[in-house]
């Protein structure tokens, strides 16, 4: 083996001094070769079983599962989120991210989708006031109600959204997704309250709240309380779900937002792992066995980019690191604790899309979907090409996004092979590199005391801002090229535009009216409920919030049933926990 | 009533500023603000750093600024330009209210520029409100800094 490597090294030297040098002499302005060639010399210590192994087995480099779940469904394709795909047992999964205006508007949207055969549960986008713990009639949130998602002020709104989900589609048969973080426990409680009102046992509920508060402080911004009380709330959700909601996922985490905020690939992986460790630690500190809750941890996604090979390597490294953390740091025994369960693998990341010549984004997402299919995930051509044009993806763009996945699965048969780059000198080398860099950064963060400490001292925020700034400089200096933006922008280029011809199912007039109507609606709810009961429950909530060891979710359920508003509950918590004040960067 | 968060001066070196032809006394001061609840601050930060590198004095407000807080900061810091970054779709309402607050505080003549996710069809309406320019994704920092400098110069002449 050593002899073989020596022979190759010798030949490499000859190649570099011969054909390569000759080729380079024709490009005197290049300091180094424009392409690199990887050989066994780059992976001298490669051991297949240690580094790769088999799909669905430790260390999971080759894939989370033994076979890619969608590979056997040749007739259907696209993202795991799509409601049309039946999973095991005929149960359906959550559909596309959706929601706008008032609960009635979102309900009508889902009604329409169901009438067209959609069997997926709601994958709910909430508006910013809802995500930040404010009611629609708070003057602070003027202009924002019902814009980026549906507004939910009380259980009434939740009940309205779920009106179309009855019978065969009742909440014991469908799965829901809630992109909610700071007030996640209130929404878990509302779902439980809804179940109780419908006589559905809590064990039957299937849902994934995003419930990943730490990333909000550094990348997404929908925080309410400071990090430490937020971790108390996370602990509450972990314990409550572990005990009472065996089919609900505890969190949907991952560095997607962190990368979109400007982090490098290595920072994405390191920060994601540091955050995961914090959440896992919360469960351990609550006295639970790691295998009792870690299998309910999921990932939303990591970040992506246009660098095809590196993103595939990233996914392989991520699976390996996470598995190692669970097994070695947390001593998990159950294989399911060590898995990265995520609906998509590699992708381009929405920040790779351009406003200029938007159809080029379709081209970009084909690349991303290919990377996804070749990195252990489905071919997810996310986002739809008109993402940069503003709120709401057109139906045309959504259609073509689905078709990319179908073409890559059915025609290109990209899912025919698991981890096709396993053993490649390039890919194994890139995987090791990304993993090594991520471990180093992770150790640095752990040395500071973990993710929360690294937020309190501003380290994570500064690093992300620095990376974003450096990327912008590279773009402006032309070192990073973006087609149609900083290159190939001459007069002879055609600025190909798109039109949205099919009317979007979101009615813009309804969205415009939503705020005014919701303000009236929430006033009416407040007027017609038992306000003495509300005051009593809020008093109890406050006392419970002061006790670190009391789980607040049962209190939230009672509050929800009495039509206490989300802000009323959050204001009590604001009194006890305080509000987050960002550190200066 | 919450007090406004501390403004964050984005410091650059004296050498940077001298190099780009702006002396200490005459450097242009800009407030970069995130109005409303939108938590996506990559663009605002990148513009803040970029304008600092271009020799501006930059104050970045951080997230969750009300229109009143932004106008207050603009007055307190005596800025030349107010830059608003909005990606949440609430730009028409928020910009209107910032502009109104600036007028009410007697500084309605301050230049206001906007960036973020602003659909093409809304640009004209923003300009009618008094916004000097809207910078869409892909606009280089250089375009922003040159626009501001050109406007300042023509304004002073």
Image: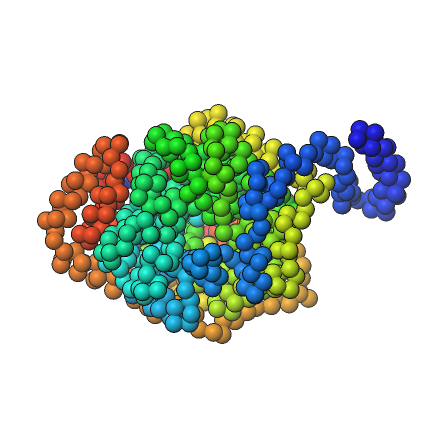
Residue ID at (24%, 45%)? A556
**Residue A243: image location, x then y, percent:** 32, 40
* Picture layout, residue A467 above or below residue B134: above
Residue ID at (86%, 36%)? A11
Residue ID at (68%, 34%)? A47
Q: Is residue A19 left or right of residue A40?
A: right
Residue projecting furthest to the left:
A532
Residue ID at (70%, 34%)? A46
Residue projecting furthest to the top:
A447
**Residue B87: image location, x then y, percent:** 43, 54
Q: What colour scheme was applied to this rendering of the protein?
A: rainbow
Q: Nearer the viewer, residue A579 or B121?
A: A579
Q: Is residue A561 left or right of residue B34?
A: left
Total of numbered circles in the picture? 0
Residue A125 seen: no
**Residue A166: image location, x then y, percent:** 31, 64
Residue A418 seen: yes
Q: Quadrant of residue A290?
A: top left
Quadrant the C terminus of chain A occupies: top left
Q: Is residue B119 left or right of residue A361?
A: left
* Picture layout, residue B24 above or below residue A104: above
**Residue A93: image location, x then y, percent:** 43, 57
Q: Nearer the viewer, residue A202 or B120?
A: A202
Q: Nearer the viewer, residue B11 or A179?
A: A179
Quadrant the N terminus of chain A occupies: top right
């Amino acid at each position: 083996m050593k002899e073989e490597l020596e022979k190759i090294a010798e030949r490499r030297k000859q190649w570099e001094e011969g054909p390569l040098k000759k080729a380079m002499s024709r490009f005197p302005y290049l300091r180094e070769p424009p392409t690199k060639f990887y050989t066994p010399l780059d992976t001298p210590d490669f051991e297949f079983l240690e580094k790769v192994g088999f799909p669905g087995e430790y260390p999971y480099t080759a894939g989370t599962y033994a076979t890619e779940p969608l590979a056997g469904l040749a007739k259907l394709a696209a993202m795991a989120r799509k409601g049309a795909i039946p999973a095991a047992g005929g149960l359906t999964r959550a559909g596309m991210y959706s929601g706008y205006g008032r609960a009635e508007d979102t309900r009508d949207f889902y009604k329409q989708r169901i009438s067209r055969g959609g069997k997926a549960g709601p994958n709910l986008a909430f508006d910013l006031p809802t995500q930040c713990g404010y009611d629609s009639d708070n003057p602070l949130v003027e202009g924002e109600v019902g814009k980026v998602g549906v507004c939910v002020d009380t259980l009434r709104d939740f009940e309205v959204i779920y009106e179309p989900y009855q019978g065969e589609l009742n909440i014991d048969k469908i799965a829901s997704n809630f992109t909610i973080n700071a007030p996640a426990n209130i929404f878990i409680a509302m779902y439980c309250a809804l179940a109780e009102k419908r006589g559905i046992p809590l064990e039957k509920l299937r849902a994934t709240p995003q419930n990943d508060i730490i990333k909000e402080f550094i990348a997404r911004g929908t925080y309410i309380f400071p990090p430490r009380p937020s971790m108390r709330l996370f602990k509450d959700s972990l314990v409550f779900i572990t005990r009472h909601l065996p089919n609900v996922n505890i969190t949907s985490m991952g560095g997607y937002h962190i990368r979109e905020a400007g982090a490098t690939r290595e920072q994405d992986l390191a920060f994601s792992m540091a955050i995961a460790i914090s959440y896992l630690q919360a469960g351990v500190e609550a006295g639970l066995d790691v295998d009792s809750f870690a299998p309910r941890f999921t990932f939303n996604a990591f970040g992506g980019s246009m660098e095809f090979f590196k993103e595939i390597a990233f996914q392989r490294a991520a699976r390996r690191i996470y598995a190692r953390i669970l097994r070695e740091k947390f001593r998990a025994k159950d294989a399911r604790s060590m898995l990265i369960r995520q609906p998509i693998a590699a992708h381009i990341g929405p920040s790779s899309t351009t406003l200029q010549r938007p159809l080029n984004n379709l081209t970009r997402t084909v690349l991303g979907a290919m990377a996804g299919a070749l990195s252990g995930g489905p071919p997810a051509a996310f986002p739809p090409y008109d993402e940069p044009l503003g709120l709401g993806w057109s139906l045309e763009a959504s259609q073509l996004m689905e078709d990319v996945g179908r073409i890559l699965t059915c025609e290109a048969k990209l899912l025919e092979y698991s981890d096709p780059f396993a053993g490649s000198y390039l890919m194994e080398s890139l995987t090791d590199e990304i993993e090594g860099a991520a471990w180093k950064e992770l150790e640095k963060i752990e040395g500071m005391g973990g993710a929360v400490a690294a937020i309190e001292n501003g380290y994570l925020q500064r690093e992300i801002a620095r990376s974003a700034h450096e990327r912008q400089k590279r773009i402006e200096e032309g070192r990073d090229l973006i087609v149609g933006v900083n290159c190939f922008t001459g007069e002879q280029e055609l600025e190909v535009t798109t039109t949205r011809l099919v009317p979007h199912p979101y009615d813009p007039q309804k969205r415009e009216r939503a705020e005014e109507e919701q303000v009236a609606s929430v006033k009416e709810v407040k007027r017609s409920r038992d306000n003495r009961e509300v005051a009593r429950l809020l008093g109890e909530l406050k006392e419970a919030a002061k006790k670190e060891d009391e789980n607040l979710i049962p209190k939230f359920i009672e509050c929800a049933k009495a039509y206490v508003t989300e802000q009323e509950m959050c204001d009590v918590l604001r009194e006890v926990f305080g509000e987050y004040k960002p550190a200066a960067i | 009533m919450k007090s406004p968060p501390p403004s964050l001066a984005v410091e650059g070196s004296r050498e940077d500023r001298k190099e780009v032809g702006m002396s200490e006394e005459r450097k242009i001061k800009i407030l970069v603000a995130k109005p409303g609840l939108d938590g996506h601050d990559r663009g605002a930060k990148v513009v803040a750093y970029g304008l600092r590198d271009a020799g501006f004095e930059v104050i970045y407000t951080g997230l969750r600024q009300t229109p009143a807080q932004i106008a207050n900061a603009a007055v307190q810091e005596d800025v030349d330009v107010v830059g608003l970054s909005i990606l949440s779709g609430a730009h028409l309402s928020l910009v209107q209210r910032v502009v109104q607050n600036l007028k009410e505080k007697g500084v309605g003549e301050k230049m206001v520029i906007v960036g973020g996710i602003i659909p093409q069809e809304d640009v004209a309406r923003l300009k009618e409100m008094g916004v000097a320019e809207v910078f869409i994704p892909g606009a280089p920092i250089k375009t922003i800094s040159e626009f501001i400098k050109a406007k300042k110069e023509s304004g002073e002449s």
